[in-house]
Image (cartoon, coloured by chain):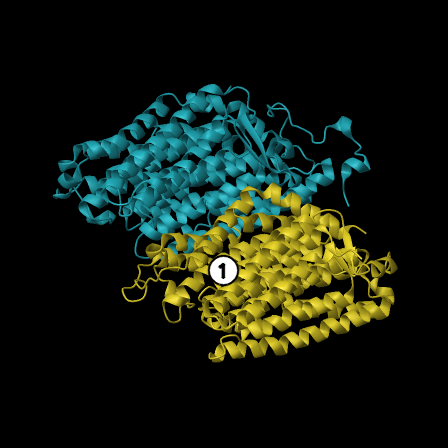
Chain colours: A cyan, B yellow
């Protein structure tokens, strides 16, 4: 059974069949049910996929392969390993919760809203399972369209500028990535004699250092913009600020993982020399992002911007964990991707509830809500503690792994990054204290969580607690995949052989050398 | 003499005469409806013959006209464009009382394009270029009561004549350098030679590039494009944008990739530079337009630049990429012009971008078609425009022209600025009370063209491997000695 293909195509089919749902009041209920059923089915399929794969293997599993334009080396190649399966689960899980939230408060033109959300889900799910560079690019770009329309049609007053900045920024990076994809395939053909865009088959190709550096730069720019990494983040405040809060949550929780995932799936394994050359520059950008994001979050006027900028800082940590080329740090980075997804989704959900009920978004406009809203205050406290990585919270484990791994190789990076943890306490506590404590107003009673809010917040906080108690559930199962992903970069960085846990492929295998001219196929 | 090889051209010329005769018959219904029917029948028969001739190369008229896979594929492309134009012209003001001439001129122009595609001789090539141009001069000025339309026709006539002169001069030099007008013989005589030994040949190539550059609207020979596109009746603009471009690139491929492959290192960089300039200037100029037809004109200039990448890359992969992109470009452009046409008939200045305020919300289907067309022109995956650009950039990288692929990517980034603006206007703004509510019933022929081409934009990408097999076959036929 082609599980992975089904997971990607199900939301797509759901979006298209949404056209059959009638417009108007009767259609609204039907559209809700339709979207919920489709996304629940995708979630169930993902859970089955999680159960099916052998998590100690570290290779791509549940692979589906179909030709698309074989003469060009293009094909539909999907599969999951120990890293991507968790991101897939994050995607389908959070989208399911998003549909629950959307079903409770369906905006105007709800049919289109739900259909576009389903398309976005298909795009993100496809991105995380793509095993072919071109397919990766297709999903990378295709998900822009639903997000563009979601922000553009249902967004705030400055949505025109926000969408344009968002799309143009992303496309600037990704079109260069397209050139890099094509160039990588053709250069690899010179080395191996075979034209392919398959990510697995491109591993271990002996690019020269110059080629590897240039190609990595082409990919890294796209990833850095999508993350976003400082200073490529100018689209973030506009897009996060203008999007409907539900969409902002999905952007921050799921889409921001696309760039990190690109690094671990493509950047490090295929272009290890380039990754090694860019490791320190990227780390500096990540650290600047941590400090800058924290500072701006601290002074943010609105709750939404505070969470948005805190997300910038947290993503800096994740990048840092990957480019330390350390197994523990990279495992921490993957765990932190999931943690951050859960925490930021919950944070945006709370911000959304507060601003919808009280009509206010400013951090300083609210106070003393804990008195009227004990449940809200409780959930908020859990989320805030997770966001600032208090020991015992789920994010603590991830950040600890990252810092411990980074410390082994670059002490200064770990020291500078630790500042970010301090700042996180500053801005999260400011947010919590000003809004929940202080002089009591009537806002608290209005904003108190209702049963319907609990439907989305309880699963999120429950999972956060679960991961806090049992981080090994994810971290352990990513080990062999992560080792395999970073091994080439570790070799390129000249790490001692004892650290490199996975074998490094050589492509083409040495016994095939030298290539005959027929195999070479060069003009 | 092999008559079969020339049947598509004979059918089309016959149908155009028939349309002309029907047009002057005294009965009103006959003179209004029958010319279009004759045109559709002619296009169908010629298309059927072109498909039937798909196979090994046949020649007619002592090797002066080829019927190979390449020519047949280009035939099908221009015939589809002609069919779409006839369908879009239903109730077109310029055509109502002169249905006969209108249909006949489109058929004649198509005949010229088919001659270009199948040319085995320099003279046939030039005759084809002239036949397609002369018919278009008249078509542009068809709405004679509109000053813009007359201006359009006159401008196209003058600029087109200059372009033809360049082309003819270049062909004459090519004859002078080789002593033959037959493409096959020219190819043999130039085997393993280079432009540097042959100054005449260098002049010939430069003049031919300029002449064809006028037809393909490549920079710096593109200045006529926006004025002519804006002034001409919209179906004619769509026809010019798609079919003329296909014919011009068929000529480019036939002459450069097909006849002068041994000179590739000499003309490659020159065409590459023109391609780069065309993409950048076309895209930047399109950013500044507020009129949709002018914007599409500059976008057409930019698209010619992308196509030139494939010509510069040459070889099998370059030719294949150009052919695929021509098909993709045909459907996305026709889709865009069909929607413009609908709006143009509803409100005054319907070709202005502002006329589309909230159009998507009022008319989701047509708005969707327009959005798909714009996204595909911008190269969004997984639409056919993306597959085409992917092929073109690949061909450039394979020919060691990575800088050209990067320029293409930069051009695509710039193009987002204006393609997305259309999407923004369509969906992100509320319809204003006065304009957008005015909704006329869309004629079935126009609506079906819009929807069919919108679906084809997606279909061409999904069935890419099938279409690519066809293009590969055509490219192989082109390169066959």
Q: Along the line of sight, which residue is nearer the eye, B138 or A235? A: B138
Residue A224 appears in the figure: yes
* Left or right of A302 on screen, residue B383: right
* Left or right of A183 on screen, residue B90: left
The image quadrant that residue A72 belongs to is top right
Residue B375 appears in the figure: no
The picture places residue B147, in percent across and down from the top left corner, at 48, 80
Chain of the residue under the numbered disc 1 shown in the image: B
| Relative height, residue A463 to residue A185 (above, below) | above
The image quadrant that residue B298 belongs to is bottom right
The picture places residue A46, in percent across and down from the top left corner, at 42, 26
Q: Residue at x 54, y 30 (%)?
A: A326
Q: Along the line of sight, which residue is nearer the eye, B174 or A328? A: B174
Q: Along the line of sight, which residue is nearer the eye, A3 or A310? A: A3
The picture places residue A215, in percent across and down from the top left corner, at 62, 44
Q: Along the line of sight, which residue is nearer the eye, B222 or B10? A: B10
- The residue to which callout 1 is attached is B87
The picture places residue B20, in percent across and down from the top left corner, at 58, 70
| Relative height, residue B61 to residue A354 (above, below) | below
Mark 1 is surrounded, within 10 Å at the Cα level, by few (under 14), some (14 to 19) or many (20 or more) other residues, namely many
| Relative height, residue B59 to residue A401 (above, below) | below
Q: Secondary structure at mark 1?
A: helix
């Amino acid at each position: 059974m082609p599980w992975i293909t089904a997971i990607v195509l199900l939301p797509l089919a759901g979006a298209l069949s949404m056209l059959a749902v009638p417009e108007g009041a009767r259609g609204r209920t039907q559209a809700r049910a339709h979207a919920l059923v489709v996304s629940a089915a995708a979630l169930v399929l993902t859970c089955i996929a999680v159960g099916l794969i052998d998590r100690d293997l570290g290779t791509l599993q549940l692979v589906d392969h179909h030709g698309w334009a074989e003469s060009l080396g293009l094909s539909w190649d999907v599969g999951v390993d120990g890293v991507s399966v968790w991101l897939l689960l994050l995607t389908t899980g959070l989208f399911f919760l998003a549909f629950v939230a959307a079903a409770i408060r369906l905006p105007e033109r709800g049919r289109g809203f739900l259909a576009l959300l389903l398309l976005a889900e298909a795009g993100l799910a496809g991105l995380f399972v793509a095993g072919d560079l071109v397919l990766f690019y297709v999903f990378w770009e295709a998900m822009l369209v639903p997000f563009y329309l979601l922000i553009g049609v249902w967004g705030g007053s400055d949505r025109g500028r926000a969408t344009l900045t968002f799309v143009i920024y992303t496309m600037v990076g990704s079109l260069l990535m397209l050139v890099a994809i094509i160039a990588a395939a053709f250069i690899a053909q010179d080395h191996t004699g075979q034209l392919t865009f398959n990510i697995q088959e491109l591993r271990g190709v002996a690019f020269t250092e110059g080629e590897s550096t240039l190609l990595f730069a082409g990919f890294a720019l796209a990833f850095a913009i999508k993350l976003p990494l400082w200073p490529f983040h100018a689209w973030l405040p506009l897009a996060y600020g203008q999007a409907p809060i539900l969409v902002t949550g999905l952007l921050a929780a799921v889409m921001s993982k696309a760039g990190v995932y690109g690094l671990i799936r493509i950047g490090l394994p295929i272009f290890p020399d380039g990754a090694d050359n860019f490791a320190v520059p990227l780390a500096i950008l990540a650290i600047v992002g941590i400090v800058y994001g924290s500072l701006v979050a601290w002074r943010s006027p609105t709750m939404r911007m505070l969470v948005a900028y805190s997300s910038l800082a947290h993503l800096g940590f994740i990048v840092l964990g990957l480019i330390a080329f350390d197994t523990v740090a990279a495992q921490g980075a993957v765990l932190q991707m999931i943690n951050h997804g859960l925490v930021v989704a919950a944070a945006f959900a709370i911000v959304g509830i507060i601003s919808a009920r009280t009509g206010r978004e400013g951090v300083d406009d609210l106070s003393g809500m804990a008195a009227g809203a004990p449940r809200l205050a409780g959930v908020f406290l859990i989320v805030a503690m997770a966001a600032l990585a208090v020991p015992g919270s789920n994010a603590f484990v991830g950040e600890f792994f990252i810092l411990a791994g980074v410390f082994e190789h670059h002490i200064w990076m770990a020291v500078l990054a630790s500042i970010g943890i301090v700042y996180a306490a500053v801005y999260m506590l400011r947010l919590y204290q000003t809004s929940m404590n202080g002089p009591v107003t009537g806002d608290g009673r209005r904003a108190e969580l209702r049963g319907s809010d609990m439907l989305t917040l309880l699963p999120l906080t429950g999972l956060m607690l679960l991961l806090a108690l049992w981080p090994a559930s994810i971290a352990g199962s990513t080990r062999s995949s992560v080792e395999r992903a970073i091994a080439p970069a570790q070799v390129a960085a000249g790490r001692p052989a004892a650290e490199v846990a996975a074998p490094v492929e050589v492509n083409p295998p040495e016994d095939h050398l030298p290539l005959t001219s027929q195999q070479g196929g060069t003009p | 003499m092999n008559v079969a090889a020339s049947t598509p051209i004979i059918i089309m010329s016959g149908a155009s005469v028939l349309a002309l005769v029907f047009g002057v018959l005294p009965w009103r219904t006959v003179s209004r409806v029958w010319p279009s029917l004759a045109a559709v029948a002619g296009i169908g028969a010629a298309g059927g013959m072109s498909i039937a001739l798909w196979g090994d190369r046949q020649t007619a008229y002592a090797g002066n006209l080829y019927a190979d896979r390449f020519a047949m594929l280009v035939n099908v492309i221009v015939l589809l464009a002609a069919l779409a134009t006839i369908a879009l012209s239903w109730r077109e003001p310029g055509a109502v009382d002169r249905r006969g001439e209108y249909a006949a001129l489109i058929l004649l122009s198509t005949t010229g394009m088919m001659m270009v595609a199948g040319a085995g001789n320099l003279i046939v090539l030039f005759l084809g270029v002239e036949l397609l141009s002369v018919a278009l001069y008249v078509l542009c000025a068809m709405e004679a009561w509109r000053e813009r339309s007359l201006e359009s026709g006159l401008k196209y006539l003058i600029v087109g004549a200059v372009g033809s002169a360049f082309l003819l001069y270049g062909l004459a030099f090519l004859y002078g350098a080789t002593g033959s007008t037959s493409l096959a013989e020219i190819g043999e005589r130039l085997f393993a030679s280079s432009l540097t030994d042959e100054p005449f040949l260098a002049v010939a190539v430069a003049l031919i590039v300029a002449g064809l550059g006028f037809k393909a609207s490549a920079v710096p020979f593109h200045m006529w494009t926006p004025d002519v596109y804006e002034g001409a009746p919209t179906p004619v603009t769509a026809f010019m944008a798609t079919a003329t471009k296909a014919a011009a690139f068929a000529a480019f491929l036939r002459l450069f990739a097909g006849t002068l492959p041994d000179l590739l290192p000499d003309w490659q960089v020159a065409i590459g530079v023109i391609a780069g300039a065309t993409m950048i200037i076309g895209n930047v100029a399109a950013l500044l337009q507020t009129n949709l037809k002018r914007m599409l004109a500059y976008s057409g200039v930019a698209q010619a630049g992308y196509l030139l990448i494939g010509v510069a890359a040459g070889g099998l992969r370059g030719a294949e990429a150009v052919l695929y992109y021509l098909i993709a470009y045909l459907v996305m452009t026709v889709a865009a012009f069909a929607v413009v046409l609908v709006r143009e008939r509803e409100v005054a200045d319907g070709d202005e971008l502002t006329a589309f305020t909230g159009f998507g919300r009022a008319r989701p289907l047509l708005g969707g078609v327009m959005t798909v067309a714009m996204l595909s022109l911008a190269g969004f995956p997984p639409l056919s425009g993306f597959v085409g650009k992917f092929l073109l950039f690949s061909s450039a990288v394979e020919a060691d022209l990575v800088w050209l692929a990067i320029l293409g990517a930069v051009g695509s980034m710039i193009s987002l600025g204006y393609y997305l603006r259309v999407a923004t206007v369509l969906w992100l703004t509320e319809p204003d009370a006065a304009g957008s509510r005015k909704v006329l019933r869309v004629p079935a022929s126009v609506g079906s063209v819009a929807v069919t081409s919108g679906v084809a934009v997606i279909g061409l990408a999904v069935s890419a491997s099938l279409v690519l097999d066809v293009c590969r076959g055509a490219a192989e036929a082109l390169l066959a000695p």
